[in-house]
Protein backbone atom coordinates (compact mmCIF):
# COMPACT_ATOMS: atom_id res chain seq x y z
CA UNK A 1 0.00 0.00 0.00
CA UNK A 2 1.43 3.39 -0.95
CA UNK A 3 1.78 6.33 1.40
CA UNK A 4 -0.92 9.01 0.63
CA UNK A 5 1.18 11.86 2.01
CA UNK A 6 4.14 10.92 -0.17
CA UNK A 7 1.83 10.59 -3.18
CA UNK A 8 0.31 14.02 -2.50
CA UNK A 9 3.74 15.64 -2.15
CA UNK A 10 4.94 14.02 -5.34
CA UNK A 11 1.86 15.21 -7.23
CA UNK A 12 2.22 18.78 -5.93
CA UNK A 13 5.91 18.83 -6.72
CA UNK A 14 5.09 17.69 -10.25
CA UNK A 15 2.45 20.42 -10.66
CA UNK A 16 4.61 23.16 -9.19
CA UNK A 17 7.75 22.08 -11.03
CA UNK A 18 6.60 23.86 -14.18
CA UNK A 19 6.14 27.21 -12.43
CA UNK A 20 9.43 29.16 -12.57
CA UNK A 21 11.49 26.08 -11.71
CA UNK A 22 9.89 25.79 -8.29
CA UNK A 23 11.32 23.02 -6.16
CA UNK A 24 9.71 21.62 -3.09
CA UNK A 25 12.35 21.17 -0.40
CA UNK A 26 10.23 19.07 1.93
CA UNK A 27 11.67 15.61 2.25
CA UNK A 28 9.06 12.96 1.61
CA UNK A 29 7.93 11.10 4.66
CA UNK A 30 8.80 7.61 3.64
CA UNK A 31 7.42 4.75 5.59
CA UNK A 32 5.41 6.92 7.97
CA UNK A 33 2.19 5.41 9.06
CA UNK A 34 -0.73 7.75 8.97
CA UNK A 35 -2.37 6.23 11.99
CA UNK A 36 0.84 5.33 13.78
CA UNK A 37 2.24 7.16 16.81
CA UNK A 38 5.36 8.33 14.96
CA UNK A 39 3.37 10.03 12.19
CA UNK A 40 2.83 13.25 14.10
CA UNK A 41 6.42 13.39 15.31
CA UNK A 42 7.82 12.72 11.84
CA UNK A 43 5.48 15.27 10.20
CA UNK A 44 6.25 17.98 12.78
CA UNK A 45 9.95 17.24 12.48
CA UNK A 46 9.83 17.58 8.68
CA UNK A 47 7.94 20.86 8.87
CA UNK A 48 10.32 22.22 11.52
CA UNK A 49 13.34 21.36 9.39
CA UNK A 50 11.74 23.11 6.37
CA UNK A 51 11.03 26.22 8.42
CA UNK A 52 14.56 26.21 9.84
CA UNK A 53 16.00 25.90 6.31
CA UNK A 54 13.82 28.78 5.08
CA UNK A 55 14.76 30.99 8.03
CA UNK A 56 18.45 30.23 7.54
CA UNK A 57 18.22 31.21 3.84
CA UNK A 58 16.46 34.44 4.76
CA UNK A 59 19.12 35.32 7.35
CA UNK A 60 21.93 34.53 4.90
CA UNK A 61 20.37 36.73 2.19
CA UNK A 62 19.87 39.62 4.62
CA UNK A 63 23.47 39.37 5.78
CA UNK A 64 24.66 39.41 2.18
CA UNK A 65 22.57 42.49 1.37
CA UNK A 66 23.76 44.33 4.47
CA UNK A 67 27.45 43.56 3.83
CA UNK A 68 27.31 44.69 0.20
CA UNK A 69 25.03 47.67 0.90
CA UNK A 70 22.73 46.82 -1.97
CA UNK A 71 19.17 45.71 -2.00
CA UNK A 72 17.97 42.92 -4.23
CA UNK A 73 16.59 44.00 -7.56
CA UNK A 74 12.96 43.23 -8.18
CA UNK A 75 12.14 40.54 -10.63
CA UNK A 76 11.97 41.90 -14.12
CA UNK A 77 9.03 40.99 -16.21
CA UNK A 78 9.93 39.69 -19.61
CA UNK A 79 9.88 42.40 -22.24
CA UNK A 80 8.54 40.09 -24.89
CA UNK A 81 5.49 41.63 -26.57
CA UNK A 82 2.16 40.10 -25.71
CA UNK A 83 0.47 38.39 -28.57
CA UNK A 84 -3.14 39.44 -28.84
CA UNK A 85 -5.67 36.75 -29.52
CA UNK A 86 -7.33 36.81 -32.92
CA UNK A 87 -10.75 37.61 -31.43
CA UNK A 88 -9.41 40.75 -29.74
CA UNK A 89 -7.73 41.90 -32.97
CA UNK A 90 -10.98 41.33 -34.86
CA UNK A 91 -12.96 43.20 -32.16
CA UNK A 92 -10.55 46.17 -32.32
CA UNK A 93 -10.86 46.33 -36.11
CA UNK A 94 -14.66 46.10 -35.89
CA UNK A 95 -14.74 48.84 -33.24
CA UNK A 96 -12.49 51.03 -35.36
CA UNK A 97 -14.82 50.59 -38.36
CA UNK A 98 -17.91 51.27 -36.23
CA UNK A 99 -16.34 54.44 -34.78
CA UNK A 100 -15.28 55.67 -38.21
CA UNK A 101 -18.81 55.07 -39.53
CA UNK A 102 -20.33 56.90 -36.56
CA UNK A 103 -17.90 59.81 -37.01
CA UNK A 104 -18.85 60.06 -40.69
CA UNK A 105 -22.57 60.02 -39.83
CA UNK A 106 -22.04 62.65 -37.15
CA UNK A 107 -20.15 64.91 -39.56
CA UNK A 108 -22.93 64.45 -42.13
CA UNK A 109 -25.59 65.38 -39.57
CA UNK A 110 -23.55 68.41 -38.47
CA UNK A 111 -23.38 69.63 -42.07
CA UNK A 112 -27.13 69.08 -42.51
CA UNK A 113 -27.85 71.00 -39.31
CA UNK A 114 -25.57 73.86 -40.41
CA UNK A 115 -27.39 74.05 -43.76
CA UNK A 116 -30.77 74.00 -42.00
CA UNK A 117 -29.63 76.70 -39.58
CA UNK A 118 -28.41 78.93 -42.44
CA UNK A 119 -31.74 78.51 -44.22
CA UNK A 120 -33.73 79.27 -41.06
CA UNK A 121 -31.60 82.34 -40.33
CA UNK A 122 -32.09 83.56 -43.89
CA UNK A 123 -35.86 83.04 -43.61
CA UNK A 124 -35.95 84.80 -40.24
CA UNK A 125 -34.06 87.83 -41.61
CA UNK A 126 -36.40 87.95 -44.63
CA UNK A 127 -39.49 87.84 -42.40
CA UNK A 128 -37.99 90.48 -40.12
CA UNK A 129 -37.26 92.73 -43.10
CA UNK A 130 -40.84 92.27 -44.35
CA UNK A 131 -42.26 93.16 -40.92
CA UNK A 132 -40.04 96.25 -40.71
CA UNK A 133 -41.13 97.42 -44.16
CA UNK A 134 -44.82 96.95 -43.27
CA UNK A 135 -44.40 98.66 -39.89
CA UNK A 136 -42.57 101.61 -41.48
CA UNK A 137 -45.30 101.92 -44.09
CA UNK A 138 -48.07 101.86 -41.44
CA UNK A 139 -46.20 104.36 -39.27
CA UNK A 140 -45.68 106.74 -42.19
CA UNK A 141 -49.36 106.49 -43.13
CA UNK A 142 -50.44 107.15 -39.52
CA UNK A 143 -48.02 110.10 -39.34
CA UNK A 144 -49.40 111.60 -42.55
CA UNK A 145 -52.98 111.26 -41.24
CA UNK A 146 -51.98 112.83 -37.92
CA UNK A 147 -50.25 115.76 -39.62
CA UNK A 148 -53.19 116.27 -41.97
CA UNK A 149 -55.61 116.20 -39.02
CA UNK A 150 -53.39 118.55 -37.01
CA UNK A 151 -53.03 121.09 -39.77
CA UNK A 152 -56.72 121.18 -40.66
CA UNK A 153 -58.11 123.76 -38.32
CA UNK A 154 -61.86 123.71 -37.84
CA UNK A 155 -63.56 126.24 -35.78
CA UNK A 156 -64.67 124.80 -32.43
CA UNK A 157 -62.91 121.47 -32.89
CA UNK A 158 -59.91 122.22 -30.67
CA UNK A 159 -61.32 120.47 -27.61
CA UNK A 160 -62.31 117.53 -29.73
CA UNK A 161 -58.73 117.16 -30.99
CA UNK A 162 -57.43 117.40 -27.42
CA UNK A 163 -59.92 114.75 -26.28
CA UNK A 164 -58.61 112.41 -29.02
CA UNK A 165 -55.11 112.67 -27.54
CA UNK A 166 -56.30 111.83 -24.03
CA UNK A 167 -57.05 108.37 -22.67
CA UNK A 168 -60.46 108.26 -21.04
CA UNK A 169 -60.34 104.63 -19.91
CA UNK A 170 -60.52 104.44 -16.15
CA UNK A 171 -57.60 102.54 -14.60
CA UNK A 172 -57.70 102.02 -10.88
CA UNK A 173 -54.07 102.06 -9.96
CA UNK A 174 -53.26 102.71 -6.33
CA UNK A 175 -49.95 104.40 -7.12
CA UNK A 176 -51.36 106.77 -9.78
CA UNK A 177 -53.03 110.08 -9.02
CA UNK A 178 -56.80 110.39 -9.33
CA UNK A 179 -57.47 112.08 -12.69
CA UNK A 180 -61.22 111.61 -12.81
CA UNK A 181 -61.91 115.34 -12.27
CA UNK A 182 -59.59 116.32 -15.15
CA UNK A 183 -61.27 113.77 -17.42
CA UNK A 184 -64.70 115.09 -16.58
CA UNK A 185 -63.58 118.68 -17.31
CA UNK A 186 -62.12 117.70 -20.70
CA UNK A 187 -65.34 115.88 -21.65
CA UNK A 188 -67.39 118.93 -20.66
CA UNK A 189 -65.17 121.23 -22.73
CA UNK A 190 -65.39 118.87 -25.69
CA UNK A 191 -69.16 119.02 -25.61
CA UNK A 192 -69.29 122.83 -25.47
CA UNK A 193 -69.65 124.67 -28.70
CA UNK A 194 -67.65 127.85 -28.83
Image (cartoon, rainbow, N blue to C red):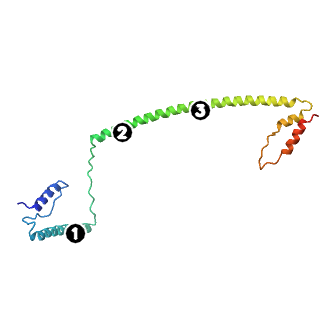
Residue 66: quadrant of the picture: bottom left
Q: Extreme left residue here?
A: 1
Question: Which callout, 2 or 1, points at the residue further toward the start of the chain?
Answer: 1
Q: Residue at x 12, y 71 (%)?
A: 41
The residue lying toward the viewer, choosing from 162 and 54, is 162
The residue that label 1 is drawn on is 59
Q: Position of residue 81 (x, y in %)?
A: 27, 46
Badge number at residue 95:
2
Helix, strand or loop status at disc 1: helix
Helix, strand or loop status at disc 2: helix
Is residue 105 placed above or below 177 in the rendered structure?
above
Is residue 182 placed above or below 151 in the rendered structure?
below
Q: Is residue 10 left or right of residue 126?
A: left
Q: Residue at x 40, y 36 (%)?
A: 100
Quarter of the image for the N terminus: give it. Answer: bottom left
Q: Is residue 180 left or right of residue 103?
A: right
Badge number at residue 44:
none
Total number of numbered discs in the rendering: 3
Q: Position of residue 28 (x, y in %)?
A: 11, 63
Question: Which callout, 1 or 3, points at the residue further toward the start of the chain?
Answer: 1
Question: Which callout, 2 or 3, points at the residue further toward the start of the chain?
Answer: 2
Q: Residue at x 63, y 31 (%)?
A: 125
Is residue 62 placed above or below 10 in the rendered structure?
below
Residue 152: quadrant of the picture: top right
Disc 1 crowd rating (10 Å Cα; few below 14, some 14-19, many 20+) is few
Q: Position of residue 35 (x, y in %)?
A: 9, 67
Helix, strand or loop status at disc 3: helix
Badge number at residue 121:
3
Disc 3 crowd rating (10 Å Cα; few below 14, some 14-19, many 20+) is few
Disc 2 crowd rating (10 Å Cα; few below 14, some 14-19, many 20+) is few
Q: CA distance from mark 1 to mark 3?
A: 84 Å
Q: Residue at x 87, y 30 (%)?
A: 151
Amino acid sequence: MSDPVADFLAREQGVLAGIDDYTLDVAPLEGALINGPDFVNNFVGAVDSELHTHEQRSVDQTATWMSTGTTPSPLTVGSSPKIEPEKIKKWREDQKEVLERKDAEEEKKKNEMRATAKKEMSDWYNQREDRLVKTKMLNRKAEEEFIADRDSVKEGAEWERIAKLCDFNVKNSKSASDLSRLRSLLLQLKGRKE
